[in-house]
Image (cartoon, grey):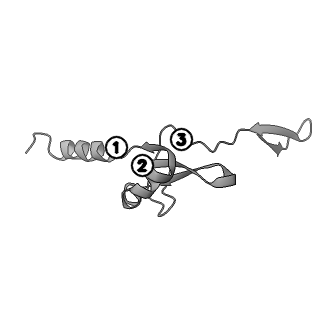
Amino acid sequence: MKKIPVSSHDAGPRSVAVRVSSLAPATLTHADRCDRCGARAYVAAMIGAGRAGLVAMLFCAHHFRRWEDGIRDAAVQIIDERFQLEQGVAAQKRADYPNGN
């Protein structure tokens, strides 16, 4: 845990404990971005990085598909939420064609 100094008007500076995690998120959000191109990430992979331990890497669907075999070989854990893309497309089609036409 890292200590970050925080200024206070009444009692002087204090330290606040901040938890820092190298774990992949349980679910990905719109704020999670592909480490390669900056597009929305749909896959998180925990990859061993030697002395640095585990590193969480985020991928858009395109870049995960491009390097999937290598990522799967190196990853300790993969969180794959690409199903959200299919659900989003299906929902958009229902909105565009509500009667199925």
What percent of the width, then of the height, locates residue 65? Answer: 36, 57
Task: Determine whether label 1 and label 3 are within 8 Å by CB.
Answer: no
The amino acid at mark 1 is Gln
Q: Which residue is mark 1?
A: 84
Instruction: Answer with mark 1 or mark 3, whichever residue precedes in sequence.
Output: 3
| Relative depth, front residue between 78 and 33 | 78
Quadrant containing the N terminus is top right
What percent of the width, then of the height, locates residue 31? Answer: 50, 49
The amino acid at mark 3 is Pro
Q: Is residue 82 left or right of residue 37?
A: left
Quarter occupied by residue 59: bottom left
| Relative depth, front residue between 84 and 49 | 49
The amino acid at mark 2 is Tyr
Task: Determine whether label 2 and label 1 are within 8 Å by CB.
Answer: yes
Instruction: Answer with mark 3 or mark 2, whichever residue precedes in sequence.
Output: 3
Distance CA(mark 2)–CA(mark 1) = 8 Å
Q: Which residue is mark 2?
A: 42
Q: Which mark is residue 25?
A: 3
